[in-house]
Image (spheres, grey):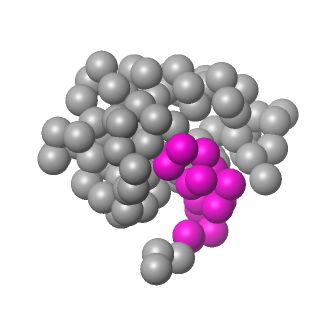
Amino acid sequence: MTTVPSSASATALDAVNECLLELLGVTELDPEAELVDSGVLNSLAMVGLIAKLERRFDIRIGKDDLDLGNFRSPLAIARLVSAKAANSSVPVD
């Protein structure tokens, strides 16, 4: 079982997983699964994911956030979402 670090809320991780499962058409995804290098998350899927997350959390993921490290795993994406939401008026939890 993966423990969610304080830099990524469980709510954000759940939301990221939900979006990824829907987007990728899979039924299960490990929070530490390698998405970028494995090719699971390609550029088109990443654009769709970003749009879903921006709508869901009322955040903006800008070009400075598009570092592949931010999208390497569901946990990395949840950290990004948590950080963006912390700077937003809409809380993640």
Residue 60 falls in which quadrant of the image? top right
> Does residue 10 lie above or below 58 as drawn?
below
On screen, residue 74 versus residue 7, left or right, reads left
Q: Which residue is drawn at 40% across and 50% down?
A: 27
Viewer can see residue 52 = yes
Q: Magenta includes 11?
A: yes
Of residue 8 and residue 87, the one placed in the foreground of this image is: 8
Specify start and end residues of the magenta stretch as a single range: 4-18
> Does residue 88 lie above or below 43 as drawn?
below
Q: Which residue is drawn at 59% across and 62% down?
A: 7
Of residue 83 and residue 44, the one placed in the foreground of this image is: 44
On screen, residue 52 versus residue 43, left or right, reads right
Q: Magenta includes 36?
A: no
Secondary structure, magenta segment, majority class:
helix
Of residue 33 and residue 62, the one placed in the foreground of this image is: 33
> Does residue 65 lie above or below 60 as drawn?
below
> Which percent across, then down, holds residue 10?
64, 61
> Which percent across, then down, holds residue 79?
53, 52
Viewer can see residue 69 = no
Q: Residue furthest left?
A: 38
Q: Which residue is drawn at 50% across and 49% down?
A: 17
Marker count (numbered): 0
Q: Residue at x 36, y 28 (%)?
A: 46
> Does residue 10 lie above or below 4 as drawn?
above
